[in-house]
Image (spheres, rainbow, N blue to C red):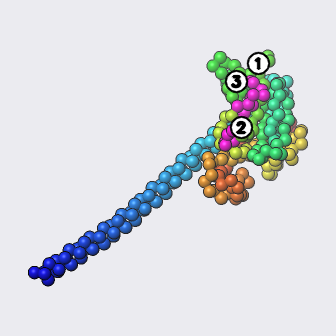
Amino acid sequence: MIGRRATGGRNTTRQAGHMLLEWLVASALGLVVLAGTLTLYRVQRESFAGAAERARMLEAGAAALMLVGQQIQMAGYAPLDQPALRARVTPGIFGCQSGRPKATETGGDLACTARSSDRLNSDGLIVRYADDAVATWHGASGEPTDCLGQGVARHGEHAVIVNRFYVAQPERRDEPELYCDGSGNAGHPQPVVEGIDRIELSYWLRGAEQPIRARALAPMQWADVVAVDLCVVVLGRGASGARGFVDCGGNRVSSLDGRRRLSLSRHLVLRNRQEPPP
């Protein structure tokens, strides 16, 4: 009887040992499955966040290209039977390389403010054109409007619209923005597209084989600009560990702050340039 009881005790201990081992193996397998599930969830979440961020950047870049591109295509417009009015909007386009267009109350001066200390190092642009009842934008009451939808007063039959574009970063904000300063309320710019890190413009002169930057143009050459290469660089939100991006020149450059950047470009032909006499 004593031997049987001892043998039964050893069997119970052996069974308990097997159950403990099985429990440890099951727990380990469960932890492996849980770790794999969490890893897969994190990867999918990061992939979704990355796709959403890229979609946001593409949307912002496309909006900036469309807005500024529409203005560039209107540059220099004035009715052919109004030579005095055409003279007021010629040149229709004027650029600032690594500078900001200088705003004036009259909206007529073509000048730049240097931005050597600005980390954004963005270009600026001034576009001028006359309004009409068909091709230009008008408000609800029928008055011509600038890039911000502000009414521009007519002097006579037509109004001269002057829009200035540049990039700036507002105080207490982490995101730079594309700004417009329109002649409807000159000197009071407003942001129009968020997340634009910089814009870069190159200009094609009549008969040229390649574009040049604004500093290479003499004052009298602006009237000979026939096309513009517009590039916008969009900045991602927050550091993502990005190492670099392809800039407006097609070169791979480093991202010093670890934030995503995306460059988008567009070639624009000026529709209202005046052909030289034969």
Above or below, 41 against 67 in this view is: below
Q: Find disc 1 in the rendering and name its residue.
A: 154
- Whether residue 264 appears in this view of the structure is no
Where's residue 85, x and y in %?
A: 82, 24
Residue drawn where x is 17% and y is 80% of the image = 6
Tell which of 213 and 206 is nearer to you: 213
Distance from the alpha carbon under mark 2 to that under mark 1: 35 Å
Residue drawn where x is 57% and y is 47% of the image = 53
Residue type at mark 3? Gln
Q: Which residues are magenta?
A: 172-190
Residue drawn where x is 10% and y is 81% of the image = 1
Regarding mark 1 in the picture, which secondary structure is present there? Answer: loop
Distance from the alpha carbon under mark 3 to that under mark 2: 24 Å
Tell which of 106 and 219 is nearer to you: 106
**Mark 1, residues whose alpha carbon is within 10 Å: few (<14), some, or many (≥20)?**
some
Where's residue 117, x and y in %?
A: 82, 45
Residue type at mark 1? Arg
Q: Find disc 2 in the rendering and name its residue.
A: 171
Regarding mark 2 in the picture, which secondary structure is present there? Answer: loop
Q: Nearer the viewer, mark 3 or mark 1?
A: 3
- Whether residue 19 appears in this view of the structure is yes
Tell which of 16 and 124 is nearer to you: 16
Asked whether 193 falls inside the magenta stretch, the response is no
Residue type at mark 2? Glu
Tell which of 259 and 58 is nearer to you: 259
Q: Is residue 262 left or right of residue 129?
A: left
- Per the rendering, the mark at residue 150 is 3
Quarter of the picture containing the C terminus is top right
Q: Residue furthest bottom?
A: 3
Q: Earlier in the sequence, mark 3 or mark 2?
A: 3
Where's residue 193, x and y in %?
A: 65, 37
Q: Is residue 195 left or right of residue 45?
A: right
